[in-house]
Amino acid sequence: MFYFADWGYLLLILIIPLIILWYRRVGKKYEATLRYPSLHAFSRIKQPTARLKIITLFGLKLGGVLLLILALARPQKGSEVREYSTEGIDIMLVLDISSSMRAIDFRPNRLEAAKSVAHDFIEGRHNDRIGLIVFAAESFLQCPLTIDYGVLKELLNQVDIVSEKYDGTAIGMAIANATNRLRESTAKSKVMILLSDGRNNAGEIDPRTAARMAAAFNIKIYTIGAGKLGQAPYPVIMPGGFTQYQLMDVEIDENLLTDIANMTGGKYFRATSEKSLSTIYNEISSMEKTEVKVKDFVNYTELYHFFLIPGFILIALSSILSLVVWRRMP
């Protein structure tokens, strides 16, 4: 960015055409001349054209004056600097890994579909700390809050269905664990996204009690019920080691998930397919925007000396040529 700090001096440039006009009409009369009755004696003498010398001297002075005017206007070069400050969001993903997540009403199954959509959700966030908690009959911290999305996605990829020993659905314990991870956060917004496909049937903490705890720490919970309406095919390992698919009722406690969301200022969603699940995560992402503040600063560098010094040089050169090299006869 090029800028004149005292641009008003540029108006002085308007006098240059007046100087040229004055010189063409009046100034020539002041040039030194010698009168001879005839030019015949000089016709065979080869000499530099005096007219060219005069124009050169005048041009040097005029160029010097122009450069001095530009120097007075204080030319500056500005470099723009942008300062970004972000107010990020702390987000804890809470994912059900009970055995019912093997149901294949989502492709390839509920858990893998949820992992894929969560992966895309993580990639779409910037400057936010995101963590991951998985739960079944118990709750486990898979990844603490982090901005290292590469590590987070790797740990997400390692998530699998819980073993039979830990099977169950402890929604209250999962909320309490996530609340414990978010409660001391100083982020602008604290968010929990809880996905489950069943009813709370394990754990020592009631889900609504856990939700009230989260609300006390200003934690907003978005709940997602994953599963088609009615029945869904579920893989069952039969004697002999082969897999048979049986239809099982989809039992999602929508009233509970709705209450949890409403108690914390969040929202409940029902996902019946991979596409609808992806749409839900995108909607949550759009509602929880990270605020980015941008301030513009411009640093200026003074350039007047690039005009001032050459201007004086041109005027000095004009004087030297006029008085020493191309001396005029008195």
Image (cartoon, rainbow, N blue to C red):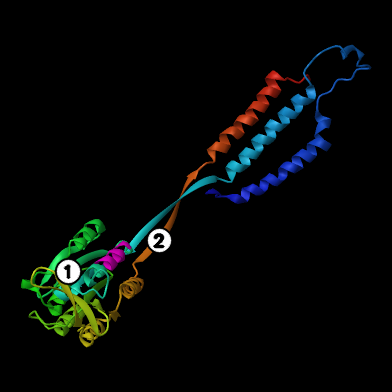
* Residue 98 seen anywhere in this rendered image of the structure: no
Q: In the image, residue 129 lies at what x, y percent?
A: 25, 63
Between residues 32 and 250, which one lies in front from this camera angle?
A: 250
Mark 1 crowd level (few <14, some 14–19, many ≥20, 10 Å Cα) = many
Which span is picked out in magenta? 115-123
* Residue 209 drawn in magenta: no
* Residue 119 drawn in magenta: yes
Say which quarter of the image contains residue 127: bottom left
Mark 2 crowd level (few <14, some 14–19, many ≥20, 10 Å Cα) = few
Q: In the image, residue 215 lies at what x, y percent?
A: 21, 80
Residue 133, label in figure: 1
Say which quarter of the image contains residue 295: bottom left
Chief secondary structure of the magenta span?
helix
**Residue closest to the far right:** 37
Rendered position, 18 above or below 134: above
Q: Secondary structure at mark 2?
A: strand
Amino acid beneath label 2: Val
**Residue closest to the far left:** 165
In the picture of the structure, the residue carrying the numbered disc 2 is 294
Q: Secondary structure at mark 1?
A: strand
Between residues 166 and 99, which one lies in front from this camera angle?
A: 99
The residue drawn where x is 19% and y is 70% is: 182
Rendered position, 274 above or below 157: below
